[in-house]
Image (spheres, rainbow, N blue to C red):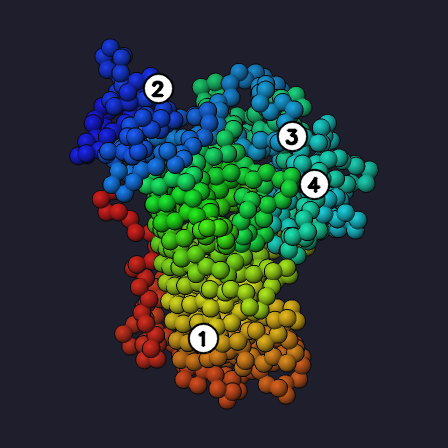
Amino acid sequence: MKGEQVNIMNELLLYVAQNGSDEWSGTEPDPNNTLSDGPLATLTAARDSIRKLRDAKGELAQPVRVLVRQGKYFPNSTLNLGPADSGSHDCPIKYESFPGEDVTISGGQRILNWEPHEGHILKTHLSDVLGSRWKPRQLFYNGERQVRSRYPNHEPDNPIYGGWTFPDGTVEENGDSILRYKAKTFPRRWKKPTQAELFRVNHFGVTNIIPIKSLDEENRLLTLTDRTTSHERAPWYISIPIRGDCRFRIENLLEELDQPAEWCVDTDEGIVYFWPPDENVSDGEVVMPVLDCLIDLQDVSWITISGFTFTETTTGDNMHREGHDGYGAMFPIAGRRYCGEAVHLRDATNCCVEKNRFYAVGGNAIYLENHSVRNVIRHNEISQAGACGVVLIGSKYFYPVTCHPMYNEVVDNHIHDCGQFDKYIAGVFLGLCDSNVVGHNLIEDMPHHAINLGNSGYGRNIIEYNQIRRVCRETRDNGAINCWMEDPQSHLHRDAERSGHVIRYNYITDTCGCVVVDESKVVANGHVTHGIYLDNYTSNCFVYGNTVIRSYSVGIYIQGGKNNLVENNIIVDSLSAFHLGGWWQPQMEGFMTGNRYCRNVFYNSEDFGRQSLRLFYHIAFKNEPVTDAIAQSDYNIFYNATGDEFVIKQKGPSFIFADTDPEYNNDTSLQEWQRVGFDVHSLVTNPLFVNSEEDDYRLTPNSPGLEIGFQQIPFDQIGIRYDESE
């Protein structure tokens, strides 16, 4: 393809290449024979060239394509695109890789001049980190993220649940800023403990990476430079102090640099230490991130970013940008550093980010904020991101227009293995936003949620046709698709706006959370993980046509909300098909009403080995019966291949029947349940799947589900829609 012209009628083509010059016109893909003209050298120069093409009104006369030639680029600064860089409907602008060529844009700088330190460890002086309070958290060798020196060591055979240690109980005073470690935890003495950072994951999976202020070896105390909560807005699940079931590790100490591919940095002396994974470091490429954003689009329209690999950006703390609503646990906190994103869109319209690869960026991959409207994020692969894959977030009002993302599409992306530095994240996170579509994505191998609809009930978003597998792997109290809707402690109002969401035709398998066992190790056991989790008074949602397979705790969980319609879903091998719960705030008594469960299939296989339980936990108020919370439950199918009896399990001070003895863990038979008026037309029978052993949950033509109105789920339409022309 070298030198091949890419001609499209009426388009102006500009070229960028590593052998180019910003003094040239950029209209040729290769330098000419006299080296007097050829491609440009940087995207910034291409942007500036397009600016010069505009007429007196600032408009373009033709579409423009910027084609970037093969290679890895290390820009000195973020490519900033503003109002002067917009395209239009008839004259859009596209920045893309040259057809058939691989283009990587790095946020790092090469590190050279290595010299021996001790044994296999090399060192080099780096003035950029000298005296810095911020310690770099990423180093790359030949494009692969290396391991920051740590104790306990990384366990390649058990990367998620291994390599942690645990505190010696809770320090009663300042328990969120002082950690007491167990005797003989650390085998080595540290010369510079204040160079270290503590990577801590609390009971709920909320992550903090905090520098160490001091070490008291006699009393086995680590004092942190910042409290792990340190904010009056912190919800209770963040405010848990450092206790015995909080796992942690210590990073960035020279004494713990004891394996190949490990590194650390001493900011007091401005030295980077590295044990290369091979002996060819002089021929290899060592990169340390310096940019937190690679392309920044603000107040622009009709721009496409396509075909690049984005990588090697800086990291930060577990929070979002300031000025928005719907953060949930990831709100901005003074003194902490936002992690950045590879591609940032703010007030962008009709832009497209497509067919890119986001690999090992330190923060979020793609971030849409404020009044970003009708943008499309499609056919990207996002892997190993430090935080979220894609974020949409804004605020409710900003005169004279709304100030949140609307009518955007996040479709056909493959998002996996994110949350490398922040575990409390999602493949796609939606804060306050409205009328967006998240569809046809493959999201897998995530520490927390696949899709999180945020802490806001203002907007109605559509979550559809996504394939989700192996998520919720490192946290608890979560769901593959999760909606917090409201902060139940500080922003709770009976008459708050609750627009609800459409959650349909998603295929969810193998959600499995983790739990600390006897304060010595972390294991995967599906602890309090759900398929679809409508938490914190989430209301007015339409949950239709979803398939939830092997969700350990609950298939579909409604926590305190009202008027949710759960219909035509298949739930396989879950401890509970549905869980209806309630919060405890007195001002919300009587709120949870009008929920409907119709034409669903609940199936437990012989391999599941548990009694089929359909749980309606109703723990809100003493005088609220389940008959108020549920408006309808009927035309469902229940089947347990083991033959165990199907029951309705209830727990708490409020029960189905007014004369029920107020004890916990009461079981109600299906016959009693039907006498109350529920599931009168439901069936306890085999739904007759095509091949459940191979996870084929289509219904056969003679399935009893079809007789009660169940509609076949279009499984062939779920997941990524690939372009056959590629």
Q: What residue is shown with label 2? A: 22
Q: Is residue 364 above or below residue 258?
A: below
Q: Nearer the viewer, residue 494 or 510?
A: 494
Q: Amino acid at mark 3?
A: Arg
Q: Amino acid at mark 1?
A: Tyr
Q: Nearer the viewer, residue 200 or 160?
A: 200
Q: Is residue 648 left or right of residue 189?
A: left
Marked residue nearer the N-terminal end (3 or 1): 3
Q: From mark 1 to mark 4, how far is it between C-alphas?
A: 47 Å
Considering the image in quadrants, where does the N terminus appear?
A: top left
Q: What residue is shown with label 3? A: 133
Furthest residue toward left: 9
Q: Amino acid at mark 4?
A: Asp
Residue at 65%, 39% (x, y): give it: 335
Local packing at callout 3 (Cα closer than 10 Å; few below 14, some 14-19, many 20+) is few
Q: Is residue 335 left or right of residue 354?
A: right
Locate residue 269: give its quadrant: top right
CB contact under 8 Å: marks 1 and 2: no
Residue at 71%, 39% (x, y): give it: 224
Marked residue nearer the N-terminal end (3 or 2): 2
Local packing at callout 2 (Cα closer than 10 Å; few below 14, some 14-19, many 20+) is many
Label number found at residue 597: 1
Q: Is residue 419 above or below residue 536?
A: above
Q: From mark 1 to mark 2, how far is it between C-alphas?
A: 64 Å
Q: What residue is shown with label 4? A: 226
Q: Is residue 115 above or below residue 305?
A: above
Q: Does dot 2 land on a helix, a strand or a loop?
A: loop
Locate residue 40: give its quadrant: top left
Label number found at residue 340: none
Q: From mark 4 to mark 2, how far is it between C-alphas?
A: 46 Å
Instruction: List x then y, in percent, for residue 631.
Output: 48, 79
